[in-house]
Image (tube, rainbow, N blue to C red):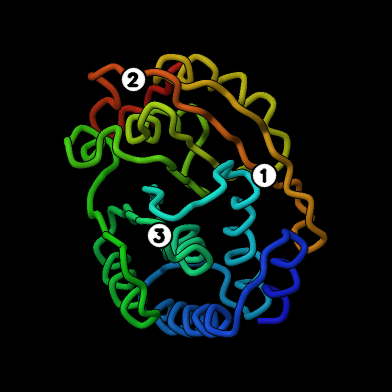
């Protein structure tokens, strides 16, 4: 895990021996399960270290909290557990919910969390448009994360209802997102959000114009949102 260790150091993060061991186990399980379950197109050792693990950890400088212990975090559309599991390995004190709609992927998530010895993780199975209306999840999270899930206007409608007022939603993006940001402004305002910043990811290991879109939750989301499953994608706000 030398490439991960080196890249984390560039972010100002230090990974101890146990954490590096956990990342190694995570990689091995990911590669093994991927032969039967379509978890990721990236399976080579260096690629997973950089494009999955390190990329997941780039969120840490954008968190804005001095002490993350006890932070309620939701990983929306987590897939193979990214970025949630890498963040949990680094910051074991967070309380993490991994949200995934595909049953085969949730089986992997349960298995790998057990193998890694991670506590304080819940795996929520279902569509975000449905779960966001449940009292257990609505407006319950300090931080909602979404990596490689959907276009920003769609993501905003699916993610911000989970955020509590004062919380934050962070989305991973690549390339020129000027138009995407402009199209998302109406949805951001309607969902009770405010664009905080677009934080560029400046790492030599990740040279494809990656950035983090940080949206602060400043007001409650109207009860009717998100709309029924499929509607945010079919008819994006704005």
The image quadrant that residue 235 belongs to is top left
Measure the alpha-carbon separation of dots 3 and 2. 28 Å
- Residue under label 3: 79
Vertical relation: 154 (above or below) 28: above
Q: Which badge, 3 or 2, is on the more N-terminal residue?
A: 3
Instruction: Determine the secondary structure under disc 1.
Output: strand
Q: Name the disc covering residue 232, or none.
A: none
Side of 13 where 152 appears, left or right = left
- Residue under label 2: 220
Q: Residue at x 75, y 46 (%)?
A: 209
- Residue under label 1: 174
Task: Choose between 205 and 18: the one closer to the eye.
Answer: 18
Q: Residue at x 53, y 85 (%)?
A: 21
The picture places residue 157, in percent across and down from the top left corner, at 39, 28
Task: Choose between 225 and 144: the one closer to the eye.
Answer: 144
Task: Choose between 217 and 55: the one closer to the eye.
Answer: 217
From the image, state whether disc 1 or disc 2 is nearer to you: 2
Side of 11 where 169 appears, left or right = left
Is the residue under label 2 in contact with that under label 3 (CB below 8 Å)?
no
Q: Residue at x 52, y 51 (%)?
A: 67
Vertical relation: 186 (above or below) 63: above
The picture places residue 154, in percent across and down from the top left corner, at 44, 31
Q: Residue at x 59, y 41 (%)?
A: 64
Measure the alpha-carbon separation of dots 1 and 2. 29 Å
- Dot 3, how many residues are within 10 Å of its Cα: few (below 14), some (14-19), or many (20+)? many
């Amino acid at each position: 895990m030398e490439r991960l260790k080196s890249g984390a150091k560039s972010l100002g993060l230090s990974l101890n021996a146990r954490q590096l061991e956990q990342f190694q186990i995570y990689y091995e399980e990911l590669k093994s399960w991927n032969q039967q379950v379509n978890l990721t197109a990236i399976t080579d050792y260096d690629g997973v270290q950089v494009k999955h693990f390190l990329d997941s950890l780039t969120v840490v400088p954008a968190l804005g909290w001095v002490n993350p212990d006890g932070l309620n975090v939701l990983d929306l559309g987590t897939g193979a557990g990214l970025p949630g599991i890498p963040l949990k390995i680094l910051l074991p004190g967070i309380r993490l919910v991994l949200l995934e709609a595909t049953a085969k992927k949730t089986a992997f998530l349960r298995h790998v969390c057990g193998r890694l010895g991670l506590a304080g993780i819940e795996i929520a199975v279902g569509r975000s448009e449905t779960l966001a209306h449940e009292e257990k999840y609505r407006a319950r999270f300090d931080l909602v994360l979404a990596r490689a899930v959907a276009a920003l206007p769609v993501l905003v409608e699916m993610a911000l209802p989970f955020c509590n007022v004062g919380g934050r939603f962070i989305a991973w993006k690549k390339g020129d997102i000027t138009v995407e940001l402009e199209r998302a402004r109406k949805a951001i305002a309607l969902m009770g959000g405010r664009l905080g910043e677009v934080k560029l990811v400046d790492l030599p290991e990740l040279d494809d114009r990656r950035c983090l879109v940080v949206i602060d939750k400043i007001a409650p989301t109207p009860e009717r949102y998100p709309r029924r499953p499929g509607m945010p994608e079919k008819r994006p706000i704005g």
